[in-house]
Amino acid sequence: MSEVRVRFAPSPTGSFHIGSARTALFNWLYARHTGGRFILRIEDTDRERNTEEALSVLIDGLRWLGLDWDEGPEAGGDFGPYFQSERKTVYDEYLQKLKDTGRTYEKDGAIWFKLQGERYTEYDDFKQTEIEKVRAEPVVIEDAVRGRVERAEELDFVLVRKDGSPVFHLVNVVDDIAMGITHVIRGEDHLSNTGKHVELFKAFGVAPPKFAHIPLILKESGTGKMSKRDRGALIETYKDRGFLAAAVRNYISLLGWHPKNDGKSEKMEINEIIESFDFHGIHKGNARFDEKKLSALNAEYLRALDIGNFTFMAAPILSEAGLIDEKTDEDYLQAVLGLCQPKARFLETLDDLCGHFFKNEYPMDEKTAAKISRKADPKALLAEVLPVFEKAGTFNADGLKAELEAFAEAKGRKVFDWFPAIRFALSGQGGGPDLLPMLEVLGKDRVVSRIKVFLA
RNA sequence: GUCCCGUUCGUCUAGUCAGGUCCAGGACACCGGGUUUUCAUCCCGGCAACAGGGGUUCGAAUCCCCUACGGGAUGCCA
């Protein structure tokens, strides 16, 4: 057991952002890699923005991703409570230390942190007003990703709002001290806050933890970091869209990090990721989100699933689309999914791929229709081949193959002449599962009646 | 404006710390070919990058400086 203690400290806002999830993941990975502890701390100091549901979105998201915490809500621990809204006495106690050493003052009803250094006033372009600044000694941030970063704070900042609630900078630092946090792994957007935090650590007389500021995730197109509104930004949407948690987790682990053992597949078991995760592999530059790459990885995971798990994932999607219900035959469902899984790329579009197995009305793809008609009249082809199906005794893939081949030979042609038309009549598509097994699964009645409907 | 961080194929990245083995490797995407009854599978091949300039050096993607560009911060949000 190592001494490493890391924390994920989200603020419940009602959604679980992908960047936030990746921060949680990196903390979790580091804890699991080092044998340390992963702590979940809820930063709910902003009274305006907090709700109960907001918390469950976070918790559900973490659980879905398989990120378990050793201390925190529902897990307990010796350093609780783990909600900042319940830690007021701790903050009061630490604030008192600052007051006692003369590092605070009151202004406009709020309590401010006083930087040490020569004071002067200057016109600030951004605020467009004269403000008081401080020539403070630069603080040094030892960052595991970026190396040594120096930054000088020049403005005093608020510690406690006039409504009496402590702000992020104070509670974040106090809790990291009180909870014995050894490594702070967070997004690079916090790097410029870190100067303030180091000032506070110094004021408390405590050595700051090791920092690791990880690159941000940029939006797929356009400028700036991923924001709530961007497609793919919210973890809670992935589950509904039929993405596999392991694939999402694998993908986001690769955003800004790369394993040392290069050359291997990017699809990695979580244990492999844990094993090779370290700060050295973290990239400094920001990473752009790429849904195609995520989808490709997801497809790989999808195909690797055994049929039981695939059914478990797929059934809710089909049910949601109104394709199946409790009356649907289990064996039929299994058979259909067995055919579709090797072709599936997204669970989300599974109804496009195999919806026709469950309903007799399905869209006829116009491009495919045009493509087939160019060679021969599909109705003529189907009228020709229909009797083969009507007469077929055993309706299985091998038997049908033999009968279709015999039929083609009698005509002096190849089976391929009829196959595209048959597929199109039965599914409305140009692609899909292998045709012969598809015929078997659909069964004689469906095959015959669908061809008749097509002819009519 | 100011401060901080960054910059290798379209995208994620290897290589940068310890300069030569890199006319820069892999993956996704894209394009072409093959397998297959079809295809969103599989296999093979191709396209494609060291931001620009200066310096140090026998030698620079790698070290230094400048510029450009990108990102973040500059809240009594976190």
Image (cartoon, coloured by chain):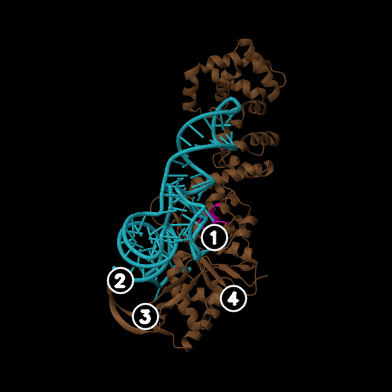
Chain colours: A brown, B cyan
Label 1, label 4: how far apart the Cα atoms are: 25 Å
Q: Earlier in the sequence, mark 2 or mark 1?
A: 2
Amino acid on which disc 2 is placed: Lys
Q: Which residue is mark 3?
A: A108
To which chain does the residue with label 4 belong? A
Please name which of the two marks, 3 or 4, marks the residue nearer to the observer. Answer: 4
Same subunit under labels 2 and 3? yes
Q: Earlier in the sequence, mark 3 or mark 4?
A: 3
Q: Which residue is mark 4?
A: A180
Q: Which residue is mark 1?
A: A281
Same subunit under labels 3 and 4? yes
Amino acid on which disc 1 is placed: Gly
On the image, the x and y values in percent for residue A134 come to 35, 81
Please name which of the two marks, 1 or 4, marks the residue nearer to the observer. Answer: 1
Q: Earlier in the sequence, mark 2 or mark 4?
A: 2
Depicted B55 relative to depicted A443: above or below: below
Q: Which residues are magenta?
A: A251-259
Callout 3: SS = loop
Amino acid on which disc 4 is placed: Gly
Label 1, label 3: how far apart the Cα atoms are: 46 Å
